[in-house]
Amino acid sequence: MRLFFVTADYTFRGMFHWLRPVPYVVNRLLFPLVQLVFFALVGQYGGSQSLSFYLVGNAIGVATLSTFGVSQAVADERWQGTLSYLLASPAPRVPVFFGRAAYHIVDGMLNMAAAFALAVLVFGLRLPLEGLTGLVLSMLVATVALCGVGLLLGALAYIFLDATLLANWAMFILLLLTGMNIPLSELPGFAAAIGEALPLTRSIAAARLYAAGAPLDAGLGLLAGDLAIGAVYAVAGYFVFGWLELRSRIQGRLEGV
Amino acid sequence: MIGALRVARAAAELQFKEVAVSGFLLFGALVQPFFIGVMTMYMLRHRPDFDPVYVVVGAALSGLWSVLLFAGSSAISHERSLGTLELVVAAPTSFFVVYGGKIAGTLAFSLVSVVFSYAIGAWLFGYPITVADPVGFGLSLLFALVALWATGMLFAPLGILWRTVGRFLGLLEYPIYSLSGFLFPILLLPVWTIPVSYALPPYWAALALHASASGELDLLGLARVWAVLVLTAVVLMIIASRLFLAVLQRARRSGSLALS
């Protein structure tokens, strides 16, 4: 546990590039908010769904930013020259690997809270009190599940080299296929099927239920599904990371590729 | 003058080659407009007055703007990281000319997003994509590129003179999509933002391209928009040239040509 939290702390502070508040505010707080405003206004102009559909979807969708931070935190080990030390250390890999996502979960929750505050204060989104617990739970599950995607992307970045580019791909795929802006029923069958296999799809659906005042148990099944999908991505990331580590040892290339 | 143009062309060609192999900028020019185009096509197609050309033009503009924003604002820091900035600044050719060429090269590359956005509408969705006024559209695109080029010229000196401003430049992607009416009318925005939109060259660029594509404006109306585009381009170029002078003077005074 100590290793888990030490990794979480140093990863967030040291490898996340944001040791000062200005870049953090720009990248993690303002960027998702301006993205939310854009898609909410396009949705409002389109008029096929209610404004709250877009506001809730995109406020939960702010969690996609977590994939950037987590994947960067894993992939940057190589760029900063610390990967060799990490691979040579006797530290157990589970806390080292999963610890990288820990602070991002808290961070993702803060970002989503800011997004919902904007939706309420600027767009007049109404959130029923009875749905708030479920909404917070949806936010938590969304960010945990997306940290799983981030861990997988971070591990894959040892092969594909550019974690930011991978995270950008992931962000736009999630924007398109998770029902954030387009109901899955409107997408072609294959695209909807991919959407069903992505984390966030169910968290967004659950959040919309709670935002409409549904009781807590109405969305629990959806959230459990998203949590399971996120776990699959995270475990897949762990195994990819382990496989790359093994391969790098066999080939005598401690930089992973 | 001819010598300066030759330098600008060389800088543009080099910049074009650099950005054409940058994964990040290829993403901005091709992938991002693809996703934005597909999403907005789905989001807007239920409108009774839906026009797919509107989405195609809007998605293309988003690609143009994103590439210009990211390549333009990072052009000088890129030179700095390569260690070539001192050589460029010390060369007898004006730094303004070299940077102008680089922005022109960036814009030339970003034009692929126009072609790609057309392909989304025509091939992926099968809509008939026809431009109502092709000549007007071509001229609008030309004037839009001039105005966007002048806007891009502001990025580098702003980012160097005020580092915090530089950090916020990357944030201007979606706000400019919104304030310039790329994919929805600015009337949806609060009234106090309308004057801000009017002050932005991308707004006039979007107005000219949307209006010529749909045939909403006649030649006189389009000419007025083109005049505003030229005017904003001239004003921005004057401001940018002053800022470039300030950057170089400050760098020479402090003896830090790396501008760090």
Image: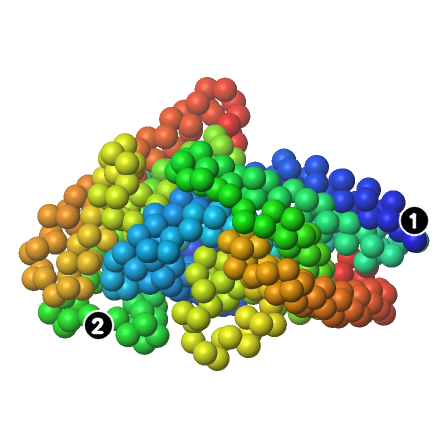
| Left or right for B188, reference B175 | left
Q: Which mark is residue B2?
A: 1
Q: Residue A81, can we see it?
A: no
Label 2 resides on the chain identified as A
For mark 1, does the 10 Å Cα neighbourhood hold few (<14), some (14 to 19), or many (20 or more) residues? few
Which residue is at a point 64% across and 37% down the rendered structure image?
Answer: B20
Label 1 resides on the chain identified as B
Q: Which mark is residue A68?
A: none
For mark 2, does the 10 Å Cα neighbourhood hold few (<14), some (14 to 19), or many (20 or more) residues? few
Which residue is at a point 45% across and 57% down the rendered structure image?
Answer: B183
- The vertical placement of B94 against A188, above or below, is below
Disc 2 target residue: A126
Quadrant that contains the C terminus of chain B: bottom right
What amino acid is found at the position of numbered circle 1 in the picture? Ile
Q: Give percent across and percent down for residue A61.
A: 32, 55
Q: Quadrant of residue B11?
A: top right
Q: Could you say whether the residue bearing mark 2 is in a helix, strand or loop?
A: loop
What amino acid is found at the position of numbered circle 2 in the picture? Arg
Q: Give percent across and percent down for residue A139.
A: 25, 58
Q: Quadrant of residue B196?
A: bottom right
Q: Give percent across and percent down for residue A79.
A: 55, 41
Q: Give percent across and percent down for residue A166.
A: 45, 40
Q: Could you say whether the residue bearing mark 1 is in a helix, strand or loop?
A: helix
Contact (Cβ within 8 Å) of mark 2 with mark 1? no
- The vertical placement of A103 against A238, above or below, is below
| Left or right for B102, reference B199 | right
In depth, the one of A14 and B87 nearer the eye is B87
